[in-house]
Image (tube, helix red, strand yellow):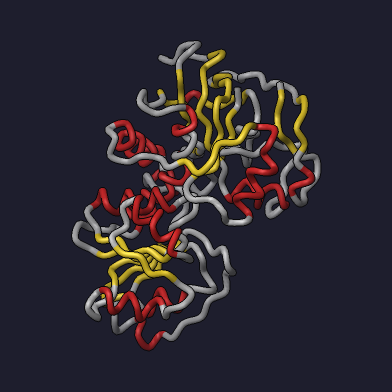
């Protein structure tokens, strides 16, 4: 099969497009012909060697395609149009036993070869029928981001109807998921945008108010927009550059939910407001199988809708990753695989 893979860690020039052995589905797996694969920042971190694993390797966690072969008992048939849950929980760790997100989770494109390829082999448990009204491209644009956003806002931060959410980094891959899920919950959404053009796009995804930085003090502007009260929840994915402002804009009992730290991981803050105002800092990562099914049901019902930035062919994976690294994207970049 054709695939984009790398034999050593490094910059985009390590990505090679060429022949790669077609996987054989093991017992309990199906072979899926990939029709589309969504990009995530994870693909870039893995290619750069932020975690070590055997090479050569194929990244790509968000896949939609067609069943080619089924090896095991399943309702799935050859020819079915499907979307893949990128994660598989171990089922045995303490967190799994308690119904929480698995600590040893296996992620498609990380522990197993992913979707920058014509075929993948994946556990039958991870395969779901594609919502009929979605194209393959749209179906490959939601799994990891919508699962991450749902787990962070609904399960971890317990965002409620009538509360106010502030979002950093709302224009990127996860922006539509965060904005749409918060609006679905019934929250008021204020988002940061780096330009007026970005502001218009984020507003089109449903955000109620936008703070265009860097020309303003964001936390002060948020305080003004909330009549001095501040917000209930801040969605943090930036880290070092924004964390002190995230705390400064919280109202009493406010929560900061952290899913990443793209600008750096070391933060410091003054505890003098932290405990009197009863703040919470909440870590969040991916989600559970049940949460994936909740998100899929909302997408199937048309209540959430994936947003595509750009579709590029598989052999242009390096250009697709460049677009993501340069932060030029609004919504999901997707590789189309014929
Ligand atoms: Zn587990």
Instruction: Find residue 202 and report its horizontal and vertical position in percent.
Output: 39, 55
- Above or below, 114 relative to 268: above
Instruction: Find residue 218 and report its horizontal and vertical position in percent.
Output: 40, 76
Residue 82 visible somewhere in the drawing: yes
Extreme residue in the front direction? 197
Residue 71 visible somewhere in the drawing: no
**Foreground residue, 40 or 74?**
40
Q: What's the residue at 51%, 66% (across, down)?
A: 238
Q: What's the residue at 44%, 27% (across, down)?
A: 135
> Which quadrant of the rendered structure holds the C terminus?
top right
- Above or below, 224 relative to 256: below
> Which quadrant of the rendered structure holds the N terminus?
top right
**Residue 199, picture quadrant:** bottom left
Instruction: Find residue 317 and report its horizontal and vertical position in percent.
Output: 67, 39
Q: What's the residue at 72%, 44% (across, down)?
A: 53
**Left or right: residue 117 compared with residue 106:** right
Extreme residue in the bottom direction? 272
Q: What's the residue at 63%, 35% (across, down)?
A: 112
Q: How many marks?
A: 0
């Amino acid at each position: 099969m054709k695939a984009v893979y790398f034999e050593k860690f490094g910059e985009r020039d390590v990505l090679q497009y060429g022949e790669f052995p077609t996987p054989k589905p093991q017992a309990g797996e199906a072979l899926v012909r990939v029709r589309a694969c969504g990009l995530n920042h994870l693909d870039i971190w893995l290619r750069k060697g932020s975690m070590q694993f055997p090479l050569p390797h194929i990244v790509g966690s968000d896949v939609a395609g067609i069943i080619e072969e089924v090896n095991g008992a399943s309702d799935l048939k050859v020819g079915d149009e499907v979307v893949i849950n990128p994660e598989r929980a171990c089922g045995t760790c303490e967190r799994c036993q308690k119904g929480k997100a698995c600590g040893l989770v296996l992620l498609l494109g990380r522990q197993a070869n992913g979707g920058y390829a014509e075929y993948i082999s994946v556990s039958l448990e991870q395969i779901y029928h594609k919502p009929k009204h979605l194209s393959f491209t749209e179906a490959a644009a939601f799994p990891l981001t919508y699962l991450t956003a749902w787990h962070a806002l609904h399960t971890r931060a317990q965002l409620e109807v009538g509360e106010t959410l502030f979002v950093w980094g709302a224009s990127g891959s996860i922006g539509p998921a965060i904005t749409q899920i918060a609006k679905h919950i019934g929250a008021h959404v204020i988002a940061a945008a780096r330009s007026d053009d970005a502001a218009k796009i984020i507003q089109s995804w449903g955000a109620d108010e936008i703070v265009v930085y860097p020309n303003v003090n964001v936390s002060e502007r948020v305080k003004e927009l909330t009549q001095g009260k501040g917000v209930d929840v801040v969605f943090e994915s930036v880290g070092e550059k924004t964390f002190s402002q995230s705390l400064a804009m919280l109202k009493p009992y406010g929560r900061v939910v952290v899913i990443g730290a793209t600008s750096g991981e070391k933060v410091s803050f003054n505890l003098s407001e932290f405990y009197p105002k009863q703040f919470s800092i909440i870590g969040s990562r991916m989600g559970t199988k049940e949460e994936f099914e909740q998100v899929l049901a909302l997408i199937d019902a048309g209540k959430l809708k994936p947003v595509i930035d750009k579709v590029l062919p598989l052999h242009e994976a390096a250009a697709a990753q460049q677009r993501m690294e340069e932060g030029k994207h609004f919504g999901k970049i997707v590789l189309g695989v014929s």
